[in-house]
């Protein structure tokens, strides 16, 4: 059925994806771009082949997560860059999990990148580009009407499952899942499901032996070898 869906009007263009309406009011089509941005869009570039990699990787991981009991927006991969997804209203929260100190956590807390953490950290940011996605807690989210307590509990439960699944999955590829960001959406019948993407754009992935970075930090930090890093993760997943 959904195999016949085609892109209609473009609804939205984000930094890394475009979203289109389809003839089915409960389905959207997302189209992944090679565009890369960092620092709230201040730094712009292209990572050749990224759109296809992120599309395929994200779809694969979402299908695995469904099997592990986390509902997701994934419906059907149409081609290299395009996927049919369930229509959701995205909760304006970036849900971040940290297993190892890195990035903004290291900077904010003065903890060296790569330091062990005694437990995984789940944190929220308010998805708002004008404000630079500020760090918030549960009370902020509820007080501002971004989510209810029940929504946040569901998001936490699913997020812990996602972390446990992804950590083990990547470790099986000799990759450490340092941290990642996910987003959730609400379907028209009010269910919270995992949406957006899971890719080297949204995860920090380090080779478990060499600690080489295999993710978007290579772009953010002008380290070179960006395309090779994305392809290396693909190679380890799909052979
Ligand atoms: P951070 O250390 O910069 O806060 O990033 C934490 C994780 O979230 C890291 O895996 C990269 C990811 N991330 C995004 O996917 N989008 C963003 O806009 C930011 C700031 C981080
Ligand atoms: N993509 C985000 C931006 O441009 C940030 C990032 O991933 O570093 O703001």
Image (cartoon, helix red, strand yellow):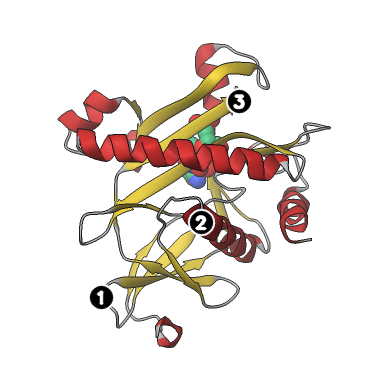
47 left or right of 207? left
The 10 Å Cα crowd at callout 1, few under 14, some 14 to 19, many 20 or more, is few
Q: What residue is shown with label 2?
A: 67
Q: Position of residue 21 (x, y in %)?
A: 32, 75
Q: What residue is shown with label 3?
A: 102
- Residue 127: in sight, yes or no? no
Q: Position of residue 58 (x, y in %)?
A: 55, 57
Residue at image location 31% in from the left, 25% down from the top = 137
Q: Element under label 1?
A: loop
Disc 3 from disc 2: Cα separation: 30 Å
The 10 Å Cα crowd at callout 3, few under 14, some 14 to 19, many 20 or more, is many
Tell me if residue 7 comes above or below residue 43 in the rendering. Answer: below
Q: Confirm or deny contact between disc 3 and disc 2 (CB under 8 A).
A: no
Location of residue 6 (image quadrant): bottom left
Location of the C terminus (image quadrant): bottom right
The one nearer the camera, 86 or 11, is 86
Tell me if residue 75 comes above or below residue 154 in the rendering. Answer: below
Query: Is the shortest distance between ligand 1 and the CB of mark 3 under 8 Å?
Result: yes
**Residue positioned most to the top:** 110
Q: Earlier in the sequence, mark 3 or mark 2?
A: 2
Q: Element under label 3?
A: loop
Disc 1 from disc 2: Cα separation: 26 Å
Q: Nearer the viewer, mark 1 or mark 3?
A: 1
Q: Earlier in the sequence, mark 1 or mark 2?
A: 1
- Residue 26: in sight, yes or no? yes
Q: Position of residue 36 (x, y in %)?
A: 57, 52
Q: What residue is shown with label 1?
A: 25
210 left or right of 33? right
């Amino acid at each position: 059925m959904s195999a016949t869906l085609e892109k209609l009007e473009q609804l939205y263009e984000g930094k890394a994806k475009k979203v289109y309406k389809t003839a089915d009011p409960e389905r959207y089509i997302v189209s992944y771009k090679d565009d890369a941005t960092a620092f709230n869009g201040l730094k712009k570039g292209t990572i050749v082949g990224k759109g296809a990699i992120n599309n395929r990787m994200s779809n694969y991981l979402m299908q695995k997560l469904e099997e592990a009991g986390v509902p997701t927006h994934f419906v059907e991969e149409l081609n290299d860059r395009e996927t049919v997804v369930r229509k959701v209203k995205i909760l304006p929260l970036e849900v971040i999990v940290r297993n190892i100190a890195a990035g903004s956590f290291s900077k904010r807390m003065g903890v060296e990148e790569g330091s062990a953490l005694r437990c995984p950290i789940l944190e929220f940011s308010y998805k708002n580009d004008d404000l630079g996605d500020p760090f918030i807690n549960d009370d902020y989210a509820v007080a501002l009407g971004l989510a209810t307590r029940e929504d946040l509990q569901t998001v936490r439960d699913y997020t812990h499952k996602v972390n446990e699944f992804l950590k083990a999955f990547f470790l099986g590829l000799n990759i450490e899942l340092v941290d990642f960001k996910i987003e959730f959406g609400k379907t028209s019948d009010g269910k919270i499901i995992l949406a957006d993407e899971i890719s080297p754009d949204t995860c920090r992935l380090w080779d478990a032996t060499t600690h080489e970075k295999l993710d978007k930090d290579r772009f953010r930090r002008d380290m070179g070898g960006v395309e090779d890093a994305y392809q290396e993760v693909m190679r380890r997943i799909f052979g």
